[in-house]
Image: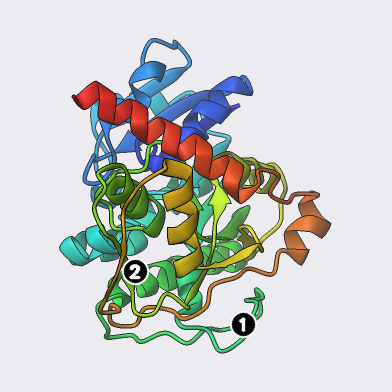
Amino acid sequence: MRAVVTGGAGFVGSWVCEALLDSGAEVVCLDNLLTGAAANVAGLRGDPAFLFEHCDVAEGCTSRAVRAALRPGVDLVLHLASPASPVDYLEHPIETLDAGSRGTRTALELADEHGARFVLASTSEVYGDPQVHPQTEDYWGNVSSVGPRSVYDESKRFGEALTAGYRRARGTDAGIVRIFNTYGPRMRAHDGRVVPTFVRQALADEPLTVAGDGSQTRSLCYVEDLVAGLLAFADSHHPGPMNLGNPHELTVAQIAEDVIRATGSASPVEQVERPVDDPGMRCPDISLARTELGWEPRVPWLDGLARTVSWFRSRSRGAA
């Protein structure tokens, strides 16, 4: 199998590239490195089945090298390219909207041209600040179209509409997964998401900055579990949308306490103002994934957290 992974040098994308190579696939990784990092795929560069091309999928990735890489044919297109953390999409709002619109169109055209399976990595953010709990795939969401988070939320919602449109109008084998909060090694320490932020602060014995009173919830899925579900979905012909995440729900305050214990930190907890449109609840109903894919997360939260802390510690020692 030959697979194209857009955003393949990102946090989740690099794990996807690695898992595909381990399965025996050839992988073409496309990334403009806006929020991804070449270091994430550095260990794959020596594999003859792996090709990295520095390009922006929203600009078409039409270089001679990319065209040559795709000429033998493509069986799978996984579209993961997009800034995904609040820090990133608030800093790069136009690029985020382009990734969800023009980037999705480019990736869909590629899949359609080659008769390949297409998978859109959408997000639980399409549910906004949900009024249905847990979130099921038939829930339409509660999203502000003009708030600061809308550049990410609406880019993904448009990407979903475009994907569904290609499936209906052209018969493209296209499907949508909605990824919930994911964590693990290769996250950037300053990307603004809750786990890397708390781990970075705890390892430095800095206060853990909990937004509001910390009663808002998140459901955290270890990255290896998420990738297994993503590739199982890719191997199906299901149209989605399908939730992929961990239904084990935690308050942000509990996550902070667990990080302090896992790191052995003396850090206090400091309450800060909640961001605009910060969702109060986040928990997936994964009944569909269980039924259709036989998939569910296997790595317990505290085990995954220990692995993540270990990775961040090793990076801190390396920097020192």
Q: Residue at 56% across / 28% down in the picture?
A: 20
Q: Residue at 35% across / 54% down in the picture?
A: 198
The quarter holding residue 104 reads bottom left
Q: Residue at 25% across / 44% down in the picture?
A: 204
Q: Which quadrant of the rendered structure holds the N terminus?
A: top right
For the question of whether residue 295 can be seen, the reply is: yes
Q: Secondary structure at mark 2?
A: strand
The amino acid pointed to by label 2 is Val
Pointer 1 local density, CA inside 10 Å: few below 14, some 14–19, many at least 20:
some
Label 2 vs label 1, nearer the camera: 2
Q: Residue at 65% across / 77% down in the picture?
A: 134
Residue 81 in the image, given as x and y percentages of width and height: 36, 49
Give the alpha-carbon distance from disc 2 to disc 1, as whole Å. 28 Å
Residue 148 in the image, given as x and y percentages of width and height: 24, 78
Q: Label 2, on which residue?
A: 210
Given residues 10 and 198, the one toward you in this image is 198
When the figure is inspected, residue 113 is found, relative to residue 97, above or below; the finding is above
When the figure is inspected, residue 36 is found, relative to residue 301, above or below; the finding is above
Position of 188 with respect to 235 (left or right) is: left
Position of 245 with respect to 310 (left or right) is: right
For the question of whether residue 160 can be seen, the reply is: no
Q: Label 1, on which residue?
A: 139
Pointer 2 local density, CA inside 10 Å: few below 14, some 14–19, many at least 20:
many
Q: Secondary structure at mark 1?
A: loop
Residue 153 in the image, given as x and y percentages of width and height: 38, 73
Which circle marks residue 154 in the picture? none
When the figure is inspected, residue 293 is found, relative to residue 219, above or below; the finding is above
